[in-house]
Amino acid sequence: MKVMYAVSSGRYNRPEFILPLLIIVQLGLNTVEGVWPLPQDFTSSTERYPLNPRAFHFGYGEQSVAQQGCSVLDAAFKRYFSLIFPDYTSANGVLQFSKDKPFIVEISVDHDDCESYPKEDSSEKYNLSVSERKAILNAETVWGAVRGLETFSQLVYQDDFGSYFVNKTEIEDFPRFQFRGILLDTSRHYLPVQTILKTLDAMAYSKFNVFHWHIVDDPSFPYQSRSFPSLSSKGAFHPMTHIYTQSDVRRVISYARLLGIRVLPEFDSPGHTNSWGKGQSDLLTPCYRGGTPSGTFGPVNPALPSTYQFMARLFKEVSSVFPDSYIHLGGDEVDFSCWKSNPDIRRFMHKMGFGVDFTKLQAFYIEKIVNITSALNKTSIVWQDVFDYHERRSSLSVVEVWRGGCYLCEVRRVAKAGIRVILASPWYLDQPGPTHNWARYYTVWPLAFQGTEEQKKLVIGGEVCMWGEYVDATNLSPRLWPRASAAAERLWSDEKQTSSVDKASPRLQDFRCKLVRRGIQAEPLYVGHCKHEYQGV
Amino acid sequence: MKVMYAVSSGRYNRPEFILPLLIIVQLGLNTVEGVWPLPQDFTSSTERYPLNPRAFHFGYGEQSVAQQGCSVLDAAFKRYFSLIFPDYTSANGVLQFSKDKPFIVEISVDHDDCESYPKEDSSEKYNLSVSERKAILNAETVWGAVRGLETFSQLVYQDDFGSYFVNKTEIEDFPRFQFRGILLDTSRHYLPVQTILKTLDAMAYSKFNVFHWHIVDDPSFPYQSRSFPSLSSKGAFHPMTHIYTQSDVRRVISYARLLGIRVLPEFDSPGHTNSWGKGQSDLLTPCYRGGTPSGTFGPVNPALPSTYQFMARLFKEVSSVFPDSYIHLGGDEVDFSCWKSNPDIRRFMHKMGFGVDFTKLQAFYIEKIVNITSALNKTSIVWQDVFDYHERRSSLSVVEVWRGGCYLCEVRRVAKAGIRVILASPWYLDQPGPTHNWARYYTVWPLAFQGTEEQKKLVIGGEVCMWGEYVDATNLSPRLWPRASAAAERLWSDEKQTSSVDKASPRLQDFRCKLVRRGIQAEPLYVGHCKHEYQGV
């Protein structure tokens, strides 16, 4: 049954024709809601079609390379059915009970990447065309199709009587940046696997595609290594309850895969390794005081061959556990004072001809680790510190810019050196400060530096960092959402179409209510309400 | 079966005797944990007794005035059994299955206030003595007994094998201040009833005893009035889903009663009443621009007799719905510009001889409202603005100090005028800022002003304010807890024993983990972990 009403489509397009104002007011100006992040090309009409959950299904197009049995899309159909019809509880197998003609969302993809992992260069482009009784979603890859399903789910809305509608719509969409990440820190506080999975869900709603898992650091080592089980049994907060087993990690990776999200592990060294030393003796540098060991330890000991044997074995394991082609090697904030205090390190420096320049020692160490991971066919990411200190920068692949101040100056320097850049500085969402100031994360211009087109292409994306000093499962969600969504639009959408905070504000408010409806504890931007408030607590 | 081990009791008392260090280390230094807020007089021993949930019960002492059937205590026994034994799921009626001799917590109270409401002068004093197979809890009132049960529940701990223990302990305890409140704002965002009830639970864990319900304000009027149903049907965010029905309010009040928490409603006027005007015409002042009404409205219109007829009826209803003897009348932040613009108001000013001093008009209005509520036998609280502007201050009963700057100067002024004071200024927890800086809420000295003992006694307590601009059910808990607990200790405990942030820090960390274990989303203070992390998300 088709019902046609004219409503103002609001923010993007002028209504094609205007029915009496009364009807517009009655139906509400907000019935056609926005999509977040904003698609590159979006045309919606005032023509709307009713959707009946009992006469709605997803299907594969005839020309689609992927067909039934495609794990990514089969799972996405199930997931999005519930997201599109949140009121509808007994979903499966009852299509026959409706006499309505069905509405079909027909998906076609060009590549059969159903059983693979999303990759750094995977296309996420899709076209979506919604018309009477049919939506056609075409994409090059299943990952593009998943993004398109997210968009479709955001196009569906309910009127005041609970009926579902979708408007006639044409969308051509693709991401501005290929790398759109969120960092979670599971060392400063342990995050239960469920919390990680829920965050992955919310990431997919904002079209993030990289989960940067800062899995270990000074305070704890929760990764349970097959090769070195002592690292977690001695270095985790608790050897049983506060670890990620191999199957936990597999579960996170395969859950993320279905959402089109890459899992990028970080094993940060030589600094930030305090917890490593508990389960691996002779790995860290013994610090000295007054000519004798003080009993404390500093960064990884770069002077011992055993260090590199250990690292080679550890990274071999990590490379096989995490399928992504990227690996994050850290390399930030190395404190030289312990190295300086240690006579063996000083002797090694002398032997290597480093003089008293400890940045050379650090560069030496990182280069060894980069070579280990290169030999494992991994592309390594390092924090900007490594770029700043390194002399032979050509050995670096990707640099992540995180320090404050003129971060675009640093982006420019890295790009000028011909190295790929990920920008994190403006998106440190763990920080206290005026938490509601989401516009601060929206008004970021990652390419606003002087450089050639070639250089700008080296900026592959950006990342929201949620460090764990003050964050665990109790407050992660409201701290991340919807502020991270502001960054997500900057990374996905066209900058020119999304440069106004005022225009974005009501759209972000709508989107935040969608997140809440989907069970995400996304905090409010300001005074107001959602039709469905968070009921979890 | 009794087991005796020596463990370091840690923070309060020296162990009476020391067994070999090995045992102490094995058992862990943290097995005897603290009580938050710190009791006034606390002596614990290293002697500990095992508790078996199948051989544990609460009972009424023979000399107790309250006996079985006492609603407050019967409910508290049930509640605290689950809180004391969180692992124990099938609780009821299986005591006979254990061969252990039972451990009895024997409660005696002097007054039979089982079916009454906690009052402003209700004693919360209690004595608790824990010895072998028995704990004796004596209190003047059931409210004191409820506080004592909370303390007892915090004394019980589990060893690494999951066994429950309690140490030999003697406690004499009473609150430093009689008024220890938390304000929730349900107008700027609607809070579901469940969220309010959960907050009441958490309040009881920190021994708060007043829920200040800032129920209506400019943005919405969710209170469903019997006398004036239009106020919520037109003034709430939504007339069905975003309101508090009479039975919702009753539910909150009776739930709070069982926890020994008073429910203090605030109907703030003459400012902060925007939403009132939607359902009650002629209540608000029409603002003028260029000699004609602009279509906007200002504060309540103090010039019309109908205003006071309306208020008398509304407050009569409110006084009967909310049993507490206090009522909060607001009176803050009145913007005079609309009153100034209105010729009828100016005419009234002239008639009354107020000249152009609009503070006189405000004082006139508030005095009328105070008289209305006095006639209903209610003690009124007003925000400090009223005290500041008022000439005849003697008509005021309780003033709440909320402005920043030298808030103790204001406390002193109010106390000097012989009026009771509630201090809120240092505890505006809704504010962004450095959210983790809990010490800021701990290092508050409410009585550090020059004044007589008599004047200091007029400071009846303090209040944590959680305004709703940026807060709703998605982020209320982590924003409130455990920071509000820092304020709670300032309001309950002896200042001299609790002046060190360093000493409080590990105790607050322990307490925060207890809150998490009890399902409260209390955010972390810093890097670390709880034995049982929050699993809700």
Image (cartoon, coloured by chain):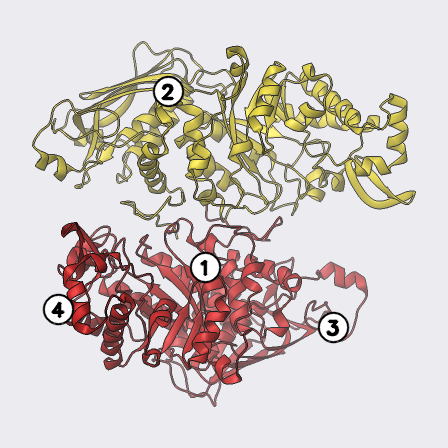
Chain colours: A red, B yellow
Residue type at mark 3 is: Arg
Which mark's residue is nearer the viewer, 4 or 2?
4
Label 3 in the same subunit as label 1: yes
Q: Secondary structure at mark 3?
A: loop
> In the rendered structure, are the residues bearing label 4 and label 2 in contact, judged by CB atoms less than 8 Å apart?
no
Q: Which mark is residue B3?
A: none
User: What is the CA distance from the residue labelled 4 to the residue labelled 2?
Assistant: 63 Å
| Residue indicated by mark 3 | A14
Using the image, name the chain to which the residue with label 2 belongs.
Answer: B
Q: Horizontal and vertical percent for residue A446?
A: 52, 71
The image shows residue B376, relative to residue B246, as above or below, that is: above
Label 1: chain letter: A
Other-residue count near label 1 (Cα within 10 Å), few / some / many at <14 / 14–19 / ≥20? some
Q: Is the residue A423 above or below the residue B481 in the image? A: below
The picture places residue B283, in percent across and down from the top left corner, at 79, 34
* Mark-to-mark CA distance, 3 and 2: 67 Å
Q: Which residue is mark 4?
A: A306
Q: Nearer the viewer, mark 3 or mark 1?
A: 1
